[in-house]
Amino acid sequence: MAVLESFSIDDTALTLAEIVRRTGIPKGTMHRILADMVAVRLLDRTETGYRLGGYLFELGMRASVERSLLEVAIPFLEELNARIHETVHLGVLDGTDVVYLTKIGGRRQASAPSRIGGRMPVHCTAIGKVLLAHADPVLRDQVLAGPLSRYTPRTTILPGPLRKQLDRIAAEGVGYEYEESAPGLVCVAAPVRDADEVVAAISVAGPSHRFHPVAHAAAVRAAADGIGITLTRRARMLAAPSFRGEFG
C-alpha cells in the first residue's frame, strides 16, 4: 500500500530511487517488493521506472457502488454537457475530500484543478460544499473547525461564512463556487440522492467570463434528481423477488 500510495495523480512513472525516497523503505527491500508487484500486474516496469498497472483499473471497476453510480450517471452527465457545453463532474465524499469519479469536458473546456480519480478539499469547491452540507454533522463540524487552506483570494476559510453557505445549500438544494478553487473558475453543483441518502454530487464548471452558474442551477438540479431517481428505482428492482429468483 505504501508503494501504491506513493504515486500521485500527476505521476506517469517513478524511479526506484524516488519510490524509496517517498516510502522510506530500504532499497534492497523495495527492489523485491516492486518485483513482486510487477509479477502480479499491480505495477508495470518501464524504461524510466515503474507505473501503476492496468490490473489496478480492473480491480477498481469491480467496486460495485462506484460502478453502479457511474453506469446510471453517465447518460445524464453527457446530456447535461451537450446542453450547457461546459465541464461536468461527478464526485463522492471521502473523508474531508471530494473524489472525482468522472469528468466530461466541454467544447471550450475550462482550466480546472479537478481530475478523474483526483481529490479536492470539500470547502473550496461547489461539489464539495454540497456534499459537506449533507454530511454527518460530526464531519461538518470537523471541517469547520479548520484550519482551512486558502487556494485563491476568494476561498472561504472562516467557519462562520462557510457554515452559512452550507445551511443555504441544505435548504436550497444547490451550491456554488466563485473562483474559490482556481482563479477564473465558477461552478454550480447539486446532490444526488439514493432514496433519502446523499451518495454523490454533480457539478458544471466554466470560466467566469462566460459561464453564469445561477442560470444553470435548475438544469444541474434536474440532472442530479434524475440520477437519484434512477438509482433508487434500480435498487428496488434488484431487491424485488423476481430479480432474486424468489417466486411464489
Image (cartoon, grey):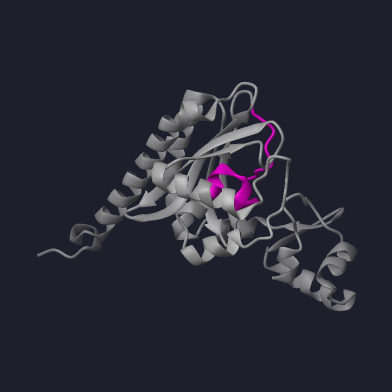
- As displayed, is residue 233 above or below residue 206? below
**Which residue corresponds to the image point at 72% horizontal and 68% vertical from the top-left?**
37
Q: Residue 72: give x, y in percent of width and height.
A: 40, 45
| Membership of 123 in magenta stretch | yes
Q: Residue 30's spot in the image, x, y percent?
A: 83, 73
Q: Quadrant of residue 187?
A: top right
Does the rendering let one see residue 6? Answer: yes
Residue at figure coordinates x 52%, y 46% from the top left? 165
- State the image coordinates of residue 208 (x, y, percent, origin top left): 64, 27
Q: Position of residue 240 (x, y in %)?
A: 21, 59
If the image is split into quadrants, where does the N terminus sit? bottom right
**For the C terminus, which image quadrant?**
bottom left
Over which residues does the magenta segment extend?
Answer: 109-129
Say left or right for 28 vs 125: right
* Extreme-front residue of the structure: 160
Q: Residue at x 58, y 52 (%)?
A: 160
**One can see residue 71 in this view:** no
Indicate the quadrant where residue 127 lies: top right
- Residue shown at 67%/68% (left/top)? 40
In the shown orientation, is residue 141 left or right of residue 8? left
Front-most of 47 and 172?
172
Membership of 205 in magenta stretch:
no
